[in-house]
Image (spheres, helix red, strand yellow):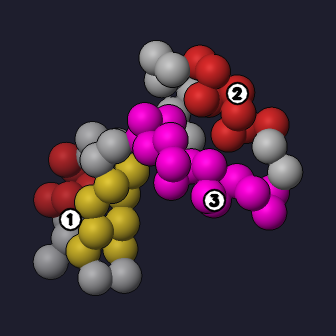
Amino acid sequence: MINEECKDKAALALVKYIADDEKEEKVLANQQVIKTPIVRNGKLATVGYQPDAWKSWN
């Protein structure tokens, strides 16, 4: 779910190389590093623009 191509390289480096137990907090504080959109349909979800997957959802 991390966008390796985000514009904020400092935040990306922080999130990528921080200890695992602190990663969730830093991602939530630096949401610009998350791929969007995150689209949910019940228990199904996609990350990024995925119209073909969305069409198959009932």
Reply above or below: 20 against 10.
Answer: below
Q: Give how far across and how far down residue 55 sits, in percent.
A: 15, 59
Q: Which label belongs to residue 56?
A: 1
User: Which secondary structure is most common in the magenta stretch?
Assistant: helix
Q: Amino acid at mark 2?
A: Ala
Which residues lie in the magenta part? 20-35
Reply above or below: 7 against 37.
Answer: above
Whether residue 1 is visible to the viewer of this picture, yes or no, is: no
Q: Mark 2 or mark 1: which is in front?
A: 2
Q: CA distance from mark 3 to mark 2?
A: 14 Å
Q: Amino acid at mark 3?
A: Glu
| 34 within the magenta span | yes
Give the quadrant of the C terminus.
Answer: bottom left
Q: Helix or strand or loop: what does disc 3 sit on?
A: helix
Residue drawn where x is 70% and y is 53% of the image: 23
Q: Helix or strand or loop: what does disc 1 sit on?
A: loop
Q: Which label belongs to residue 12?
A: none
Q: Nearer the viewer, residue 14 or 56?
A: 14
| Lower position in the chain sequence, tag 3 or tag 2 | 2
